[in-house]
Image: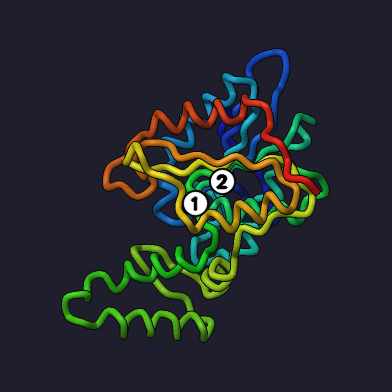
Amino acid sequence: MQAFFLPVGSGQRFAMFHPAQGAVTRGMVVYVHPFAEEMNKSRRMAALQARAMANAGYTVLQLDLLGCGDSSGDFGDASWQDWINDVVFAYQWLRRQGDAPLWLWGLRAGCLLAAQAALQLEEACNFLFWAPTPAGKPLVQQFLRLKAAADLASGNAKAIMDDLRQQLALGATVEIAGYVVAADLASGMEQATLTPPALAGRLEWLDISTQADASLSPATVKPLQAWQNTGFAVRSQMVTGPAFWQTSEIEEAPNLLVATLAALEQPAPVMAAA
């Protein structure tokens, strides 16, 4: 693994590069991290999976987006489009390292960013989604509720939520749980959906639950069907494990690590008829 900074415009992005082990590179993978504190909670799982992928013959690039982690800029400086541009930049850099099949691997909001970045690419790519959210609006609502959580008992939660939304609508920034969020970031994320790109490849969709008999949420049916209808070879599965991106302590999900490699190494599922 190589850790370094990539120059982007007037700033730089912190990157971790995991070259494929072995004589043949089986794929080039860009990891797109989730939003805010979920990124920090999931760093260990992302690192474990990236190393496992490299050992299995995949070259992996992890990039901290603008204002995140060790990259330059403040979180409050970032817009949703800035982050999309960073994903495109990561793809361009990684593509110069080899010509193996491309994978965009996202976690939570990172899946939305990966899908939207792919609309700007000139080649078909494959997608690996971990616990994807079909739309960004619920994520924004969930994040805003953190500000109101302390006032639930007093009955002021709704007023606080309304005030936050009004501030964002006026173009102001808001501070929530230690993160300053710009209006452009909140609005872009709120409008984001898992829209498939026109150039079809594979989609491996992995959700996670602590219950062994859990099934995929009904909310996933529509986006999965949309990707199939576009021509993507789609496979989805539920994996047993903790929601490590939101647990109070840093946790691992070993079953997800195993299931991910197995999904990549299986033959592609049959594509939907055009």
Residue 45, percent across and down?
43, 35
When asked about the image quadrant of residue 164, the answer is bottom left
**Helix, strand, or loop for circle 2?**
strand
Colour scheme shown: rainbow
Above or below: residue 162 compared with residue 105 = below
Q: Residue at x 78, y 44 (%)?
A: 124
Numbered circle sitting on residue 108: 1
Q: Is residue 14 visible?
A: no
Above or below: residue 22 compared with residue 79 = above
245 left or right of 34? left
Instruction: Name the quadrant of the N terminus.
Output: top right
Residue 90, percent across and down?
68, 45
Above or below: residue 78 compared with residue 220 = below
Q: Total marks drawn?
A: 2
237 vs 72, nearest the viewer: 237
46 left or right of 222? left
Which kind of residue does numbered mark 2 sit on? Gly
The answer for how far apart the CA atoms under marks 2 and 1 are is: 7 Å
Q: Residue furthest left?
A: 153
Q: Residues within 10 Å of mark 1 (few under 14, many from 20)?
A: many
Q: Is residue 82 visible?
A: yes
Q: Residue at x 57, y 30 (%)?
A: 263
Asked if marks 2 and 1 touch (Cβ < 8 Å), the reply is yes
Numbered circle sitting on residue 96: none
Which kind of residue does numbered mark 1 sit on? Arg
Q: Residue at x 44, y 81 (%)?
A: 165
Q: Residues within 10 Å of mark 2 (few under 14, many from 20)?
A: many
Above or below: residue 167 compared with residue 89 = below
Residue 163, percent across and down?
38, 84
Q: Residue at x 56, y 64 (%)?
A: 78
The residue that mark 2 highlights is: 106
